[in-house]
Image (cartoon, rainbow, N blue to C red):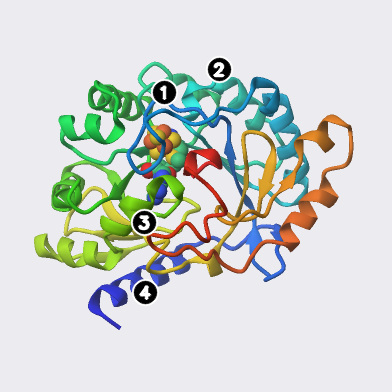
Amino acid sequence: MSEGGDLVARSVEARRQAAAPAATSMRDGFGRSIDYLRISVTDKCNLRCVYCMPLAGLEWLRRDELLSYEEIAQVVTVMAGMGLRRIRLTGGEPLVRRDLPALVRLLAAVPGIEDIALSTNAVLLEDMADELRAAGVGRLNISLDSLQPARVDALARRPGSYDRIMHGIAAAERAGFEPIKINCVVMRGRNDDELADFAERTRERPWHIRFIEVMPVAGSLEISAREFVSALEMLERLRGIGELEPVAGPPGNGPATYFRLPGAAGTVGVITPMSHNYCDRCNRMRLTADGRLRPCLFGDLHTPLRDPLRAGEPLEPLIRRTLEIKPERHWLVQGAASGSGGLVALSQVGG
Ligand code: SAM
Ligand code: SF4
């Protein structure tokens, strides 16, 4: 095993040892315990990140196609009765959906739900951080692909993004969100020269920066084929600035492996969907904005819940069936559309 591979293996072990014993939960056909649901509340977004959403946007869902907040809470209530414990709200950009704190309040009141997290680009966070925290959001993941203002605006293809994101992060810190995880999709020639700059930030700030390998969907094929940087390469390059100690990382439900620079307040981590498939540890399902329950981020398997829900049919058998068809792993191939299940962008399913 390469030194980088060994680092990843040691960090996975550190996480395993720190993990709490599994609560009662749903099991899939491979015996994996599923207690985590990522809920996409909208397919729309106020940014156009180069690896995610086409500049012209996508064909948006109609309003009546979206699950209402009450319908989302109904799905969560049924799943919580089956063992669901943790939720992440995502999108698209979840903060563009009107009055998101109202949904958080509904979900926080569902018996059994212990943890509500939010993934956001932070553009609208400044004015909402306090209310989201009061409503019951416990943890935040914020996407930030560069520390350079002009670059952030260029990668997001929306001028002014950098300033608004930074104000959003500051507001989140003031509101008491901890930990704050920063997601950075690494692309060769666009931002891979900033790995060390990001890591240096963690010496002073308690940020947990997670470098993500770009994943191939139809809208990111070129970037996936030409600009892919593996996590092993990222770690090799990070070792140039100091010794990396494998650590358990901040609380959460995700697949990142974490490291700390000596004496640093925060951590750096890598998320390796391509180079180190972590599907054997998968603990989640996904609910799309139009109410399809997906057992895997990729592939085209899903169970429509919206129409049965509106028809008053029981959801539990449909949820059980979706657990049964959860695939053993994803079949993504770097630079190829096969395996993504016809997705144009992760925003369509809640990345
Ligand atoms: N809008 C929110 C945000 O950006 O955090 C939530 C939705 S976004 C689809 C969720 C995460 O998916 C972000 O961290 C984003 O960087 C990541 N993402 C989107 N497309 C990706 C791709 N092709 N490869 C890797 N990560 C991707
Ligand atoms: Fe929007 Fe998030 Fe996709 Fe960027 S990654 S375009 S912020 S949904």
How far apart are the two marked residues, 3 and 4, measured between alpha carbons?
Answer: 14 Å
Q: Quadrant of ligand 1?
A: top left
Eye-nearest disc, 3 or 4: 4
Q: Position of residue 112 (x, y in %)?
A: 69, 43
**In which quarter of the view is residue 201 placed?**
top left
Q: Secondary structure at mark 4?
A: helix
Residue 141 visible to the viewer: no
Identity, as a three-letter code, of the amino acid under mark 4: Ala
How far apart are the two marked residues, 3 and 1, measured between alpha carbons?
Answer: 23 Å
How far apart are the two marked residues, 4 and 1, measured between alpha carbons?
Answer: 36 Å
Note whether 158 is above or below 220 in the view shown. above
The quarter in which the N terminus is drawn is bottom left
Q: Sequence order check: which comes first, mark 4 or mark 1?
A: 4
Residue at image coords 10%, 60%: 241
Identity, as a three-letter code, of the amino acid under mark 1: Ala
Q: Secondary structure at mark 2?
A: loop
Residue under pointer 3: 249
